[in-house]
Image: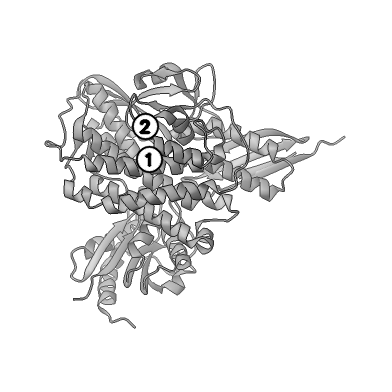
Amino acid sequence: MTVETRTIKVDMLARVEGEGALYVRFRGGHVEDVRLTIFEPPRFFEALLRGREPTEAPDITARICGICPVAYQMSAVHALEHAAGVAIDGQIRALRRLLYCGEWIESHVLHIYMLHAPDFLGLPDAVELARTHGDVVRQGLRMKKAGNALIECIGGRAVHPVNTRVGGFYRAPSRAGLRALVPELEWGRDAALATIKFVATLPMPDIEQDYEFVSLRHPDEYPLNEGRIVSSRGIDIAPSEWSDVFEEFQVRHSNALHARVKQRGAYLTGPLARYSLNFDRLPAHIQQAAQDAGLGPTCRNPFKSIIVRAVETLYAFEEALRIIAQYQEPAPSFVPVPLRSAVGHAATEAPRGLLYHRYAVDDAGLLSEAQIVPPTSQNQGSIERDLWTVASDGIGLTDDALRARCEQSIRNHDPCISCATHFLDLRVERA
Amino acid sequence: MTAPIRVIGVGQHYRGDDAAGLAVAARLQGSAGLDVHVGVPDAAWLLAQIEDQPCAIVIDCVRGGGAPGSILRLDAAAAAHLRTASTTSHGNALAEALALGTALGCLPTRLVIFGIVGDRFALGDAMSPAVVAAIPALVDLVRAEALSPPP
């Protein structure tokens, strides 16, 4: 008797940040193997930071990604300030939160409109979406522009901003400069609410995954820059305890390190985790908007991440407006951060999830060690589990339909392969 | 008074000849009558720079189309046939921006793309001598294009 095999491959995954591939193999009607392969070579950022001045870390690590450079800058400055025992508060703290809002807006909107929405409508890409839903794409591009303008005003430029430094900012943006952004941010707030309503109408596969969610949690705020690392299965630690609970490990098929909870396994960071662990930190009217869009306080359907991103986009617009309304130019724009013989840790919430940095500074005041754990690296195990579920459920689909569904399920997590080391391309084998 | 002409240099500093568009734009900074911007390849950003402008000039490096250092002048219709040859994980900004802008009907009335044919695109490469040598001529061409009356 022969056992039927079937292989589905995607050799170059589109609409993700970076380069990678997907391979699914069926044997005898069951999924036998799933591999998310990141084949882009390692980028050695951790190694090239060694021997550098700590003050260089924010700008060097920002180059890891053109979509989420602020996340790298924020995790870097917080980790180095932690090493020095310096806590930043007041307007500098608020300004950092505002900068992060800009990044959430531009990154989430890019993903919602340009990368993810076409999947739900059976369209090949954003260009086709522009042909069929021109007003929708126009709205998305304008929202993204508002996020970019915020980053540019605070960071000096929209991509790889240059104004962030350990201890604060090289120069504080003017109150007038930020207030000039208010009308467009107010428009964006309304557009974000419309976005939630739009994505709520998209057809959603009915899948629930038993993730261990991991995110920051702050006593008062929806988390961006600060908080303890918590999980849906009881983890509650300071970022400095990251390596006590989590570990990175290598798999043969990926150039990006995976991560897991020690003695437990895969976990998920990102919008689903943040939202599910911090629903109570959202303002009541945003909770209501989420519920009106069909979300409960917890969301375990990875396809609904597009709705959660839209909810977080609304939060980011509102938070930006709140901070700008209270903004006073900090003087000075930074505080001194003396660094000698110290180790510092920080985790912040990149658009795609938890971004952990650890730095050691030697006696000469230079970086002797750097560890950077991006969200996509941490999510690889959960993405492969999603693929296993989606492939098993979709075994009756044609190869093309299954390939499309698998690609969509990868895009649910907005993977940044460039950050993780780089990745994406899909192969399905039916054996 | 005539509004300045929007000029956008696109490319990456660390990818050899892909920096050519940025280098040309840098030389054009401060030129009278020009509003010069530079950026990394990002379709949404690029479209935001050119959308609804009466006139825009984009400078980018291209692969093929002549010997390294050759200069190509394309209008929007010709540029619509550009194919993706991305050296970045984030896609081909120019081709995607033009396709999006065409679909949305927001491209400039007059859009000119200058391409400089590159040779080296690997990470860490310097620009090739032929491309470096062609940059002054391309700077002059962009200035002349900006000064020329609309057809």
- Regarding residue B27, the answer to whether it shows in the image is yes
- Circle 1/circle 2 CB separation < 8 Å: yes
| Residue at 33% across, 48% down | A147
- How crowded pointer 2 is (Cα within 10 Å; few <14, some 14-19, many 20+) is rated as many
**Between A49 and A185, which is closer to the camera in this rendering?**
A185
Q: Which residue is mark 2?
A: A222
* Residue type, mark 2 in image: Tyr
In the picture, measured across the screen, residue B28 lies left or right of residue B61, that is: left
In the picture, measured across the screen, residue A38 lies left or right of residue A217, that is: right
| Residue at 30% across, 29% down | A50
**Between A415 and A342, which is closer to the camera in this rendering?**
A415
The chain that hosts pointer 2 is A
Q: From the top left corner, tell me how far across and down residue B89 is, in percent.
A: 45, 48
Up the image or down, A237 lies above or below A418; here it is above
- The kind of secondary structure element at disc 2 is loop
Q: Quadrant of residue B6?
A: bottom left
Q: How many marks?
A: 2
- Regarding residue A156, the answer to whether it shows in the image is no
What mark, if any, has residue A315 been given in the picture?
Answer: 1
- The kind of secondary structure element at disc 1 is helix
| Residue at 46% across, 53% down | B91
